[in-house]
Image (spheres, rainbow, N blue to C red):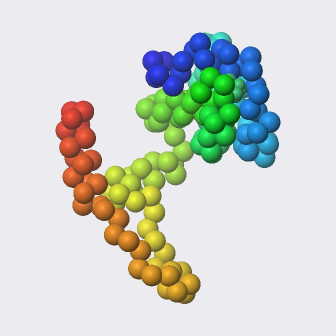
Amino acid sequence: MSDKKLNLDLLKKCGECGACFDLCPSSLHIEGYDPRAVIKAILGGDKAELDGVLNSKQIWQCLECHHCLEMCYQHYGFESAMTAMRLLATKRGIHPIQVKKGWDMFAKTGRLGEPNMGARKRLGLPEPAASGKEEFLKLFELYKESIGQ
Ligand code: SF4
Ligand code: SF4
C-alpha cells in the first residue's frame, strides 16, 4: 500500500491515541463501526484481515465529516485511512454498487444526481443552475488522455 494517506508512522500514533473516537458520528451512531479496528488491521499487515477490511462496509461508513481531521494533533485523522482503504477497494472493484452508479453518472453528466424538477416546481424553487457538464466533460477527457486511458 503506497497511498500517501496510509502513512504508517502517523497511523501507529493514531492507533495508540483514539482521542477523536468519541466525537466521530459514525462511531457514535453506527453499530460495529470502529476505525481503530481498521487501523489495527492495516498496521498488523495480515493479508486475510486486510482483505476482510476491504470487503467490509465499515470503510464506506465514514461520513468524511472531517471531525477527526480537524481535532487531530497530527493533522492526520481516521478519515485519511478510511479514504485510502476505499480507494484501494475501488481499484479492486469491490466497492458498493451505489458508488459505481454515482461515478458513472458523474462521468457522464458532471452531476451526482439529477434535480427533481417536479419537487422543485411544487416547492416553488427556480430552475437549477446549469451543471457545467460540457466544460467538465472536456476536462475529464483531457485528464483521461493525460493518464493514458
Ligand atoms: S471523517 Fe469519518 S472517521 Fe472521521 S470523524 Fe467523520 S465519520 Fe468519523
Ligand atoms: S485521528 Fe488524530 S486525534 Fe484521532 S485518534 Fe488518530 S491521532 Fe488521535
Where does ligand 2 appear, by image quarter? top right
Residue 31 drawn above or below residue 45: below
Residue at the spot 43% in from the left edge and 68% down from the top edge? 114
Residue at the spot 59% in from the left edge and 27% down from the top edge? 75
Residue at the spot 41% in from the left edge and 79% down from the top edge? 127
Residue 65 drawn above or below residue 81: below
Quadrant for the C terminus, please.
top left
Residue 96 image point, x, y percent: 54, 45
Q: Is residue 89 visible?
A: no
Q: Quadrant of residue 8?
A: top right
Q: Is residue 88 visible?
A: yes
In the image, taking residue 29 as reference, residue 87 lies left or right, namely: left
Residue at the spot 30% in from the left edge and 61% down from the top edge? 133
Q: Nearer the viewer, residue 7 or 76?
A: 76
In the image, taking residue 121 as reference, residue 144 lies left or right, namely: left
Tag count: 0
Residue 103 image point, x, y percent: 42, 50
Residue 46 drawn above or below residue 25: above
Residue 60 image point, x, y percent: 60, 41
Q: Quadrant of residue 134?
A: bottom left
